[in-house]
Amino acid sequence: MKKLVKSNKPTRLAFAERMVEYGEINQDFVVFEADIGYSTNSYLFDNQYPERYFQMGIAEFGMMASAAGMAANGRPVVVAGYGVFLTMRALESVRSFICYPNLNVKLMSSHGGTTAAIDGVTHQASEDMALMTSLPNMHVFAPCDSASSRALFDVTMETQGPVYCRLMRDSYYELYDESATFKCGGSNVLCEGDDLTIVSYGDILFQAIEAAEELRASGVSVEVVDAYSVKPLDWDTIGKSIAKTGRVIVAEGHQQRNGMAYEIACRMAKQGLSAKFDHLGLKDTFAESGAYPLLLDKYGLSAKHIIDVASEMLLEQELAV
Amino acid sequence: MPKTAETRMSAQALGELANNIRLDILDMVYKAQSGHIGGSFSAAEIVTTLYFAEMRNLDPQNPRLPHRDRFVLSKGHACPVWYACLSRLGFFDAEHLDSLRKINSILQGHPDMKSTPGIDITTGSLGHGCASATGMALEGKAAKDQRRVYTVLGDGEINEGVVWETAMAAAKYELDNLVFFIDKNNLQMDGTSDEIMPLLSIEDKFRSFGWHVLTIDGHDIEQILCALDLARLTKGKPTCIVANTTKGKGVSFMEDVRNWHGKAPSTEEYQAARAELVA
Ligand SMILES: Cc1ncc(C[n+]2csc(CCOP(=O)(O)OP(=O)(O)O)c2C)c(N)n1
Ligand SMILES: [Mg+2]
């Protein structure tokens, strides 16, 4: 597995920086903001292209419907905001006026999952993936670091139709370099193994990697998949991996219910693929304010929790033999 | 009964208290290294006056008395000012102030009715709080009690459409038990209100929506008290008090500076701010 390097660039910044560069490549698209431009970093686009930047005020629902109007003639719109406000406050605009007519509106969404940490529940987007993946025509991506954010900005713009791209408040690690490839419906197998598959994305991917490293050190052969394309999901790769290892853990910074794990379980059942299955996420509960690592500890999302679940899974199988 | 001029704290004492509340806010945000000082300081006199001179039937030992007056901080990010007032009134121990935004704390990053004694409604997503306050005022009418409901909104917050939906409903139901303060500090997150979304005349807007409207200096306690008296005397209409304020009020290098919206002070900044507030 590639060595992780500490990062000081949050995905929300890497994504916005690429958006500014892309402003030259695609001269048609515009950006909508709702007064958190210094937080989403969309202000960088304003600095470069003020005539293509629309500051709509603190009015997410109206902004989203206006984005639909702007996009109705084919002009792509990037809408910046926090996950909760884009996916919940503005949900009906996203559903009925962007997804239904399949418009080119791209949601650049910061503070995904519990990464808003200290701000508390009103700012944590812990149901965003369930909502966005439920919408027909919507694509959902979740980069974990700078290189994947930059690459997925391009994929976002090249994908026809609406996209929800989930970004994070803080920086964690750099995993990829510029040579890594990303595509709509793709995933990356970060390390190969035979005993256990761990599927994750975004911030929790780093917990998965840490867990995998510890498990590998104790002799367990773990395969880690970065399922950055949450919808469409790369079932081809994930299904093959589960068939090979016979065990899968899905770990996400999201409610357990209606997250990626539900889709994987559904596909396994449909295909008759039998394997040990478990999943980590918020257990039908809201989180709270707190430092990010402490939240992961308290709500069962840390590397340690993944290791515990894996150990139990491996033990059960041994006893059964 | 409303407090009479004799039983009320004097304007001067309230002013001193508001200043101490600013110190509490500064300490809280410094210790948490996170939180919103600018908007907490701009609302310090308003929230202090409401809690210490205006609101009735508040009982820290029994925070859910049905007929108590209600306060809703619709601009929930300014919760340090609310927490400071509640702790000084004895709703919870002052030691909790050190746990702001920390895990397991009763003081969440944004106001949470399930965690904090004295907080009646969760806010933090702008716009919703004033609509919830309107529901509380409607419930007061339904319950036929004498409660009054006080709300503080940010001037940026009123960009949200829900504020205007609510303004119509409150006028329709003649909610004379409802008061909105607009903390008009002319700043929001990305810039001045003129840059982000020109508000033109907030007074004209509310007046045309059927409200009783007053304009005051939001740092002048006498004016706040007088506006509250006039609001209480007004029947058949909700009152909107447009309070002209300064974001970051009280610390020279924080006043009117966009960046102090949601920034935690460094040790040097903390000490300098403290020195100005105790001077
Ligand atoms: C619905 C919603 N959108 C965005 C935010 C992020 N946000 C927090 S404070 C703020 C600016 C608020 O400005 P204002 O209402 O003027 O408050 P004040 O100046 O008193 O701090 C923004 C955009 C939020 N909390 N809720
Ligand atoms: Mg303001």
Image (cartoon, coloured by chain):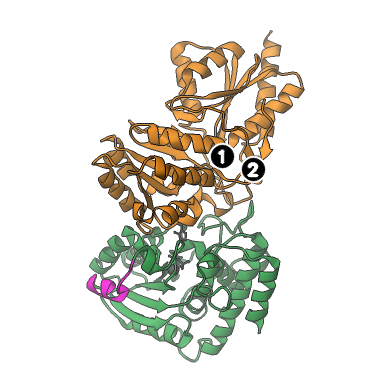
Q: Position of residue A6 (x, y in %)?
A: 67, 41
Q: Is residue B34 above or below residue B151?
A: above
| Residue behind mark 1 | A146
| Residue behind mark 2 | A7
Q: If the image is split into quadrants, where does the N terminus of chain B sit?
A: bottom left
At a point 67% along the width and 75% down the height, the residue shown is: B272
Are there few (<14), some (14-19), or many (20+) residues within 10 Å of tag 2? some
Snapshot quadrant of residue A204: top right
* SS type, badge 1: helix
* Residue type at the position of mark 1: Ser
Magenta stretch, residue numbers: B198-209
Residue furthest to the bottom in view is: B6
Chain B drawing hue? green
Drawn side of residue B99 relative to residue A154, left or right = right
Chain of the residue under label 1: A
* Residue type at the position of mark 2: Ser
Q: If the image is split into quadrants, where does the C terminus of chain B sit?
A: bottom right
Split into quadrants, the picture shows ligand 1 in the one at bottom left
Chain A drawing hue? orange
Q: Contact, CB < 8 Å: mark 1 with mark 2?
A: yes
At a point 55% along the width and 89% down the height, the residue shown is: B12
Q: Earlier in the sequence, mark 1 or mark 2?
A: 2
Q: Is residue A56 above or below residue B156?
A: above
Chain of the residue under label 2: A
Name the one closer to the observer, A253 or B95.
A253
